[in-house]
């Protein structure tokens, strides 16, 4: 599946700290055969890929549509509709389907959002595979 991750408040905090579990989940998702992309309302976030050494996991980065979500994909250079999105804004999740996460700002000692994200992606992929069989 083509998985699109939002950046700010989904993967990183306001002070640019990486949410716990991001790299481990990215590694497992790639092993599971998924293609990972970043997108943001602030534009392609290659600086995040570089800063956190995500090169082995992220295929490409794009502008994220903030309104008229499906219509704006072509305008923003996104070559296909995401199969699944992970975002802290329900409008994006509602538009494409995926997992809504709590913003990455609460104390990290209790942050288990990425574990939940992985479980939800896995369950979704299994349901899709079963429905195709």
Image (tube, rainbow, N blue to C red):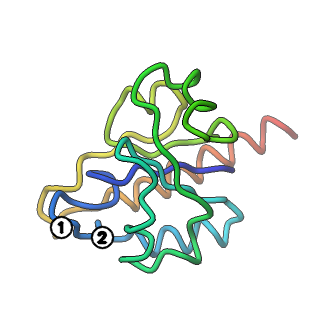
Q: Residue 20 carries which label?
A: 2
Q: Is residue 3 above or below residue 58?
A: above
Q: How crowded is mark 2: few (under 14 residues within 10 Å), some or many (20 or more)?
A: some
Residue nearer the viewer, 26 or 125: 26
Q: In the rendered structure, find residue 16 and report the number of the disc placed on it.
A: none
- Using residue 19 as the reference point, say whether residue 73 is left or right of it: right
At 22% from the left and 66% from the top, the residue drawn is: 16
Pinpoint residue 112: horizontal percent, then vertical percent. Answer: 30, 61
Q: Which of 96 and 112 is in front in this view?
A: 96
State whether residue 42 is above or below residue 96: below
Identify the residue at horizontal 34%, vertical 59% (top origin): 11
- SS of the residue under disc 1: helix
Q: In this view, does 104 lie to the left or right of 76?
A: left
Residue 82 occupies which quadrant of the picture?
top right
| Residue at disc 2, secondary structure | loop
Residue at (63% x, 69% y) in the render = 30
Mark seen at residue 108? 1
Tags 1 and 2 in contact by the CB under 8 Å rule?
Answer: yes
Rendered image quadrant of residue 81: top right
Q: Position of residue 123 (x, y in %)?
A: 59, 48
- Residue lying furthest left: 107
Image location (x, y in percent) of residue 67: 42, 22
In the image, is residue 8 above or below residue 66? below
**Cα distance, mark 1 to mark 2?**
7 Å
Is 41 placed left or right of 126 in the picture? left
Query: Outermost residue, right direction?
Result: 133
Q: Residue at x 29, y 66 (%)?
A: 19
Q: In which quarter of the image is the C terminus?
A: top right
Query: Which badge, 1 or 2, is on the more N-terminal residue?
Result: 2
Mark 1 nearby-residue class (10 Å; few <14, some 14–19, many ≥20): few
- Where residue 37 appears, as percent x and y from the top left, is 56, 56
């Amino acid at each position: 599946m083509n998985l699109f991750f939002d950046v700010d408040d989904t993967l990183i905090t306001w002070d640019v700290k990486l949410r716990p579990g991001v790299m481990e989940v990215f590694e497992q998702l790639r092993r599971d055969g998924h293609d990972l992309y970043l997108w943001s309302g602030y534009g392609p976030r290659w600086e995040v890929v570089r800063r956190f050494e995500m090169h082995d996991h992220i295929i490409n980065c794009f502008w994220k549509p903030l309104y008229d979500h499906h219509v704006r994909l072509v305008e923003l250079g996104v070559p296909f509709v995401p199969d699944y999105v992970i975002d802290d804004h329900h409008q994006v999740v509602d538009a494409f389907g995926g997992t809504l996460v709590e913003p990455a700002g609460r104390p990290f000692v209790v942050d288990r959002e990425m574990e939940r994200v992985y479980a939800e992606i896995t369950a979704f992929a299994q349901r899709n595979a079963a429905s195709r069989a």
